[in-house]
Structure formats: C-alpha cells, structure tokens
Amino acid sequence: MVVVSCGALGTPQVLERSGIGNKELLDRLTVPVISDLPGVGENYQDHQRIVTPYKTSLKPGETMDAFIRGGLDINKARQEQDPILGFNCLNFAGKVRPSEQELTKLDPALQEAWKQDYKDQEMKPLAIIAELQA
C-alpha cells in the first residue's frame, strides 16, 4: 500500500499525473490510465479558516510577512536559498466543530449542509483557526 499526501490541491494532481483518476479526463490529456477512479480531483471544497496576524519584535527576515504580503520575490529567494522558504508560519492551529446546541441555532439550510457534509465525518472541521506569524 502506498499513501500519497500532498494536501487538498496537490494530492489529486499527483494521482492524476500518475494515471489514477477519471479515465475520460486522463485519456484527453494522454496520461496512461493505471486506475479509473472518477472521484479523484472532484468535489473539492475550499478550506475554511480564520487567520490571526499579530505584531512582533522579530526582524523582517525572521517572519513570513514579506512572503504573505507579496513583497518577497520568490525567484530571488530561491536563487539566494533564503531560509524563509523553509519556515512554517503557523505557530498553532485549531479545528472547530459546533456543539449540538450550537447546531440548533443555525439556519435550516446550514443545518442541512451540516448533515450532508460534516455530521458523520468527525475529523472534518467546519473551520480552521490558525495564528500567523506576521
């Protein structure tokens, strides 16, 4: 058994490029089909998250601020082997799921969506809260 984990966006790409996915799509892209699994890459649902930036006394090169704000030239950083490319900018993160009592206060449409997409998947959070080093 092989486990591939490249995140919500990366895993389907790796699988499809390896020939695992919807045969019709792979045939159109001339990728040899290893396994016809039509669900690969389908039904993507964006991550829900709350990111909280904060001020710090760290120097500019010690935080992800320039990277996040777009002020860091990624090609230059790669050429210079900037250590920031190895940073993990999250100091902590938490997953949030509402309680049964909180669910009763949701709009009926949201309650239905909860039942369909979240209720029976205990490890699937409704939101992810993360503290971001800025």
Image (cartoon, rainbow, N blue to C red):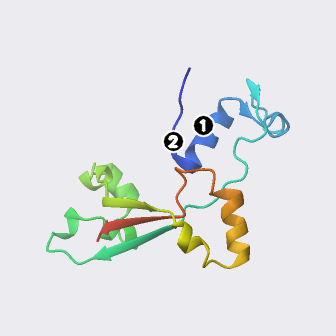
Q: Position of residue 92 (x, y in %)?
A: 31, 60
Q: Position of residue 42 (x, y in %)?
A: 73, 49
Residue occupying the point 63% across, 42% down: 12
In this view of the protein, can residue 32 be seen by the observer?
Answer: no
Residue 83 vertical position relative to residue 47 in the rendered view, above or below: above
Residue occupying the point 68% across, 79% down: 107
What is the spatial separation of the Cα atoms under label 2 and label 1, in whole angstroms? Answer: 8 Å
Residue 69 vertical position relative to residue 23 in the rendered view, above or below: below
Quadrant assignment, res 114: bottom right
Disc 1 is placed on an element classified as helix
Compare residues 125 and 49 and report the one nearer the observer: 125
Image quarter in which the N terminus is found: top right
Q: Position of residue 62 (x, y in %)?
A: 20, 63
Q: Is label 2 in contact with label 1 (beta carbons under 8 Å)?
A: yes
Q: Residue furthest front?
A: 101
The residue tagged 1 is 14
* Residue 77 numbered tag: none
Amino acid bearing label 1:
Val
Residue occupying the point 38% across, 68% down: 68
Residue 41 vertical position relative to residue 52 in the rendered view, above or below: above
Q: Position of residue 6 (x, y in %)?
A: 51, 42
Amino acid bearing label 2:
Cys
Residue 115 vertical position relative to residue 120 in the rendered view, above or below: below
The residue tagged 2 is 6
